[in-house]
Image (spheres, rainbow, N blue to C red):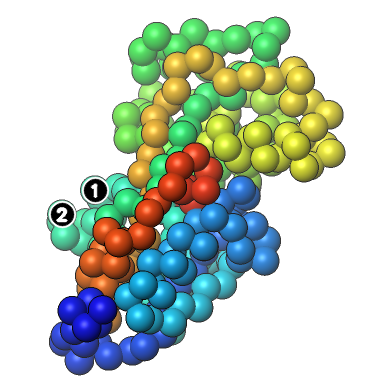
Amino acid sequence: MAIILSSFDQGNAIARQVRLTTLEWPPYVIADGSGPSTEMVTSVFQRAGLEIHTQVFPWNRALLLAASSPEWTGLYPEYYAVGEDAEAGGKRCIYSDPFGTSPVGLLQRKDDPITFRSHADLRAYVISVVRGYQNEARLDDMISAGEIYVELSENDVQTIKMVAGRRVQAGVIDTNVFAYLAERDPAIAAVSGDLEFHPRLLVTQNLHVCFQNSAEGRAARDAFNAALSHVSAGTGAGAATGMGPN
């Protein structure tokens, strides 16, 4: 533990409480901030001998605070994106080693399945994605280039309802998130029997803490990574988180 703490003391970054923003993203993080992702991140920092404070915000506010407010050290859970990685020429943050996974698929209606043999097939459809979320690199590039028409939603619930209501032909969503909502949200349970995931998974994302690109953020990231190797990640949703998303 002394070795882990010494890495956090470097560069005068001697704060003993790590403050992270997060979002409501069940089952990984629920409304009160608890959940398997919070439990995992907390366990890692406790292993490092550090206190942790987390707070739930709407996703885009969580991003902004973690990136720019000195009160916050970083954000979790987040998918890796090279364009955001300050250590790879990006602009926003530095990433921890992965602490979980997020399986991401294309939700569709059972009576109107899409064709998805390659990404080129997706040009034929209108697809719902949550505003501000990263999804999968090739898909996101095609959306940015205007090659795929999307309808933005504000959250996963809205994406599911858009697919069920035939406003779009498919929606991008974590499969564990859909299963959780279908079990616990009456509105989603009412339509879940009409829906299914395309059998080809879009991507399995790794989940990270994204720390501020600062001396304190780097020290916290290094302490997290050092402790992570000593904490079992487990399996399934309990090992997962984004996002997020991002």
**Closer to the camera, 232 or 10?**
232
Q: Position of residue 41 (x, y in %)?
A: 43, 64
- Percent x, y of residue 232: 38, 54
- Please say if the residues under marks 1 and 2 sit with CB atoms less than 8 Å apart: yes
- Whole-percent x, y for residue 233 in the image: 40, 51
Q: Quadrant of the N terminus?
A: bottom left
Residue at position x 69%, y 20% from top?
195
Q: In the displayed structure, would residue 33 be above or below residue 89?
A: below
Q: Quadrant of residue 163?
A: top right
Q: Identify which amino acid the numbered label 1 is placed on.
A: Val
| Residue 113 horizontal side relative to residue 230, left or right | right
Q: Which residue is mark 1?
A: 82
User: Would residue 122 be seen by someone viewing this image from the given angle?
Assistant: yes
Front residue (pair 205, 39): 39
Pointer 2: what residue? 88
Query: Tag 1: Cα neighbours inside 10 Å, few (<14), some, or many (≥20)?
Result: some
